[in-house]
Image (tube, grey):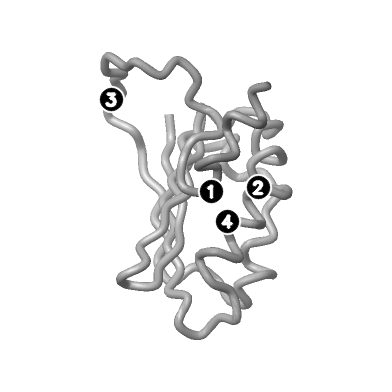
Amino acid sequence: MHAVIVWWDLSASGQTIESLRTYLRAESVSAFSEVPGLRFKMWLSDPDANRWGAVLLWESKEVAQQPLPSRALELIGYPATVAHACGVEATAEGRYATEQLALRGLAFDGAVEAVEQ
């Protein structure tokens, strides 16, 4: 397994966390749901630091090299401020009450019920 972690400082961008949430709902989440070899992607935001990022978990380092259906670079206007790729030592799943992990988070708060119906 292989992990990629990226963060953007949005200070020099015309994009905001809220505008990027709209991008997630409109296209990015569904596009990444179709990427072969991607086991998991989690988008992150830090409003206090004005940062936006993601963590991607891949089946292998090789499959992580494929072109991605992301317009984040285009929208934000510059490459990620921080980007790290690394091997995964171990994984675990804890106990949970919410069965479906997809379509959760701040971008979908209040919208999940509409999607599930």
Alpha carbon separation for disc pair 3 and 4: 30 Å
Structural distance between the alpha carbons of marks 1 and 2: 7 Å
Q: Residue at x 36, y 37 (%)?
A: 87
**Which residue corresponds to mark 1?**
107
User: Disc 1 vs disc 3: Cβ atoms closer than 8 Å?
Assistant: no
- 15 to 113, vertically: above or below: below
Work out whether mark 4 precedes mark 1 in sequence or the reverse, and give the earlier one.
4
Residue 46 location, quadrant: bottom left
Q: Which mark is residue 84?
A: none
Q: Crowding near pointer 4: few (<14 within 10 Å), some, many (20+)? A: some
**Do callouts 4 and 1 mark residues in contact (Cβ within 8 Å)?**
yes
Residue 90's label in the rendered image is 3
Name the element at disc 1.
helix
Residue under the point 57% across and 33% down:
112
Against 21, residue 31 (above or below) is: above
Give the labeled residue for mark 2. Answer: 25
Q: Amino acid at mark 3?
A: Ala
Work out whether mark 1 precedes mark 3 in sequence or the reverse, and give the earlier one. Answer: 3
Depth check, front residue: 24 or 58: 24
Query: Of label 3 and label 2, which has the lower sequence position?
Result: 2
Q: How many marks?
A: 4
Q: Amino acid at mark 4?
A: Arg
Q: Are marks 2 and 4 in contact (CB under 8 Å)?
A: yes
Alpha carbon separation for disc pair 2 and 4? 6 Å
Q: Mark 2 is on which residue type?
A: Arg
The C terminus, quarter of image? top right
Between the C-alphas of marks 3 and 2, the distance is 30 Å
State the SS at label 3: loop
Disc number for residue 21:
4
